[in-house]
Image (cartoon, coloured by chain):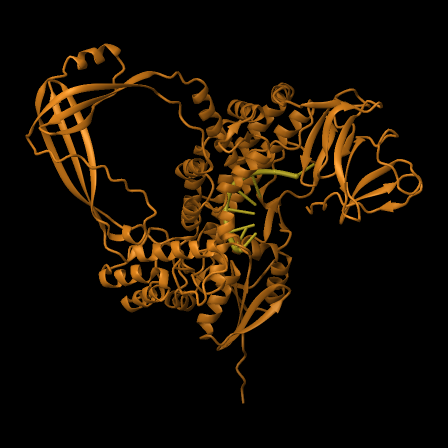
Chain colours: A orange, B yellow
Amino acid sequence: MVIPAVKKILIITEKPSVAERIARVLSGGKMKEEVKGKVKIYRFYRGDLHTVVPASGHIFQLDYPDGKWTYPIIVEPENLIYKPIAGKKAYIDAIKREAEDADLIVIATDLDTEGSAIGLEILEALNIKGEVKRMEFSSLSEAEIKKSYENLKNMDYTRAYAGFARRVLDLEWGANITRALTLSARNHRWVKLLSSGRVQGPTLRMIVEREREIRSFVPEKFYVIKGIFEAGERKFEAFLRGKIKDPGKIEEIKTLVGSESRANVRERKVSLRPPPPFDGTTMQIEVSSITGLTPRQIADRTRGIAQQLYEAGLISYIGTESQKYPKSWRKEDFLDMVKIIASYSPLSRDAMWVLENMREKAVEGRKDDPAHPCIHIVGAPEKGFPTENHRKVYEIIARRVLATLSPDGEDMRTIISVRIGENVFIARGVVRLSDGWRRVYPFMKSEEKPLPRIENGQEVKLIDIKVEEKETKPPKRYTPRSLIKAMEKLGLGTKNTRAVILDLLKERGYVEGKTFRPTKIGERVVDVLSDLVPEIVDPNMTAKLDEAMRRIEMGELNHKDFLRKTLNELSGYMIKFKELEKAIGESISSAIEAKSVGTCPKCGGALVLRRSRFGPFVICINGDVKYDLMPKERVIEGSCECGLPLVAGSIRTKSGKHIKYERCLGNCDRSPLRCSNCGSTAIPKRGKYGVYVKCSSCGSVNFFKISRAKRG
DNA sequence: GCAAGGTC
């Protein structure tokens, strides 16, 4: 008897949820789950032995081989290395172990350049040899998973190379420019890090340019002219069309008072479609603006209100990016959902109304997510809600769902225009004809502005003119939202990275405030880069990269050729930078307002207050001395007799009493903190588990809790 | 100490 050899097929996915889904579909639900470390892997037989193991996004990071922190540093792409990303070890280990005895590796990461690059990085970093295939699917429907599995493709190397080229370019340009900026400034002033990159650069430039537009803005006066008209018994107001800048025009218009003319009245019915169902992001934004809760309170992964509603089985997955209902849903499924809402008494009247007036097809939005449908209702609470906020969030989501199944609303829009000579006055009105979905979802603004009934052609008389003086306003600073939109328009960053990059600009000290005001350093960095490395502050670089990636993927362009060319360009810029390093450094560092808190005892330079993730510290601008502050201490006015600044803080004794204290930054003898045992100077220290006070002479340790030391 | 991109 011949026992047929069973092969081991290893399927590697981009994330755990996809591993689970693929295993479930291909095994018909009969897979076995094994937990390796914190990673869940799945095994099943389908003829051969199949193992599905997830990655977690990128698990290796492209980096320079260890070396000196200098520039220019241009490394051939093949000499860059893949470093394991901290925190991803469990995934790396699981994949490595499962790949060892696999006969066939199937890369089942997302079907885009980044997904293929993740596949390539796993193959190369783990040195996986042998047969490799690619599973190509763009949705996680059962049919598509099965189809892609039955039609395995060759590994899509060109697509992966396109992603690899992006990574190399971003790393080498970013690291070179960051090092160049930082090192040049450091010769003059102490700076932590001055970074830039393909996305940071143009984004910061937009912020700086906006600020300069605001600064150079000259307001202009203009006039809004309102005519009061009389038509028989009725009166209405209409605005003169056009922007009036010439005050002489006002007098001219005033002479028209008393004129008669005929009204031109146009009416138009408009239907207003319901809004689409929520995806995760729009849910957060909208629920936050209706309730005043912060997006974090709503969607925090562990304690968020919506997250809890999801875990309680009341709403569907909130992390979705889809604004579409499940593709498999038929009319009955929608009816079932509305019935669930109807079973929740505060909404049952509205839900019943929707059942009676349900539209043919639910309204859906453009955004889609292969893994999850839009946020919808899956259950009703049995015994109310734990808090009022839970109730509010649930009801808003339920109402949103109802709205998508409700009929259009209808408004009547009226425009009355009156011409007197060359001047046209216009009045606009809106009246609600039917609420439609607005009955169940009353959160979107739609104001009614009724106008008196005027017939088309009716005679009207201008009886008064009112003038309001106004000024043109400068453009507004960016808000996080408007800036993210602007980035999106230019193709800068991705939906996952835009907000992260804005945080980074803040952390670097380039911008401050809620409305992105550039700091002096931010402006100087933009100026220096515009001058020396214009490419890195130009959104065009991203456009060029996108085009190159497209061509690499199509096989029209060799990624090595592309990289050679762009790294050559970079090298040219960096050589120029190095030559001018002194002047650049002076220029940047002159913008760094190192607010001095004292003078360095070693070199006499300024002492400045900084903050790291471990807490505040004081450092000499030349880096000669550095003093840590306890997390809640601050530098206060005046100085210790030894010349160093004084700091103030408070400690809590074991009995819970708070004691305020001041001390010398250098903990010299004048420090008022005394050991409770022997009376000599005691020094607060920062340890792993918090802050404690240790006596320098008798060594006794008093555990005063100042505050918990932050973990890195 | 760096970038930008995934995922959590």
**Viewed as shown, does residue A560 lie left or right of A592?**
left
- Which quadrant is home to the N terminus of chain A? bottom right
> Residue A195 placed where, x, y %?
59, 33
- Residue farthest to the front? A233
Asked if residue A173 shows in the view, the reply is no
Residue at 75% from the left image edge and 43% from the top image edge: A706
| Vertical arrangement, residue A567 with respect to residue A531, above or below | below
Asked if residue A187 shows in the view, the reply is yes
**Viewed as shown, does residue A695 lie left or right of A501?**
right
Residue at 44% from the left image edge and 35% from the top image edge: A483
| Vertical arrangement, residue A94 with respect to residue A304, above or below | below
Closer to us: A367 or A185: A367
| Vertical arrangement, residue A221 with respect to residue A688, above or below | above
**Viewed as shown, does residue A669 lie left or right of A480?**
right
Closer to us: A649 or A138: A649
Closer to us: A113 or A190: A190
> Residue A171 placed where, x, y %?
57, 40
> Residue A503 placed where, x, y %?
55, 38
Asked which quadrant contains residue A582, the reply is top right
Residue at 23% from the left image edge and 63% from the top image edge: A356
> Residue A644 placed where, x, y %?
80, 25
Asked which quadrant contains residue A544, the reply is top left
**Viewed as shown, does residue A217 lie left or right of A420?**
right
Residue at 63% from the left image edge and 67% from the top image edge: A36
